[in-house]
Image (spheres, rainbow, N blue to C red):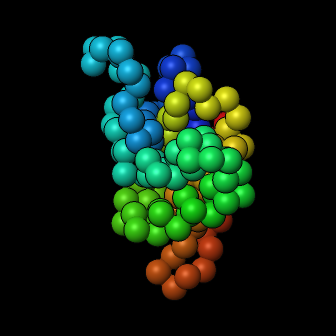
Amino acid sequence: MLIKTRRWNDPIEPDDGTRLLVCRFRPRALRKADETWDEWHKDLAPSPDLLADFQGKHGSSIGWARYKTRYLAEMRGHSEAVRELARRATTGETLTLLCSSSCLDPERCHRTVLRNLIEAAANRRDDGRATGRTRSVR
């Protein structure tokens, strides 16, 4: 299983597999013909309120730790979508999670948190034991 993370405007690589945009908003002024992704999963992106709080649009930024905690809470409501991506990854499909062009640090981006959620879901069997079948690439 291979799950990669990149920005939507990073050059497409031959081993990217299925490229999934996981941004709440579609990049502005980008023609449909110039899209670099195969699927758009805006439901797996942070909510507009969470983004605004992280960007400090309602006062001080909430910071990475609080952002991550709130994003994980939001994703509990999308566990079926996460499990579906995990299923796809465990069947051998390579997934590349794409985020905003302005998101420079993958370690402080929801795409990495989401990748970890997908990997955790893929590593669980029905009985709850780990299968140990993940591989991440940044």
Name the residue rendered at 34%, 38% in the picture.
40
* Residue 20 in view in this figure: no
Q: Is 102 on the left or on the right of 96, as rendered?
A: right
Outermost residue toward the left in this view: 32
For the C terminus, which image quadrant? Answer: top right
Q: Position of residue 25 (x, y in %)?
A: 39, 35
Name the residue rendered at 47%, 63% in the picture.
74
Q: Position of residue 54 (x, y in %)?
A: 61, 47
Q: Nearer the viewer, residue 44 or 115?
A: 44
* Residue 25 in view in this figure: yes
Q: Is residue 70 above or below residue 14?
A: below
Q: Is 77 on the left or on the right of 73, as rendered?
A: left
Q: Is residue 30 above or below residue 98?
A: above
Q: Is residue 100 above or below residue 88?
A: above
Q: Position of residue 20 (x, y in %)?
A: 42, 38
Name the residue rendered at 60%, 80% in the picture.
129
Q: Nearer the viewer, residue 31 or 38?
A: 31
Q: How many marks?
A: 0
Q: Position of residue 101 (x, y in %)?
A: 55, 24
Quarter of the image for residue 36 reads top left
Outermost residue toward the front in this view: 59
Q: Nearer the viewer, residue 126 or 107?
A: 107
Name the residue rendered at 44%, 47% in the picture.
48
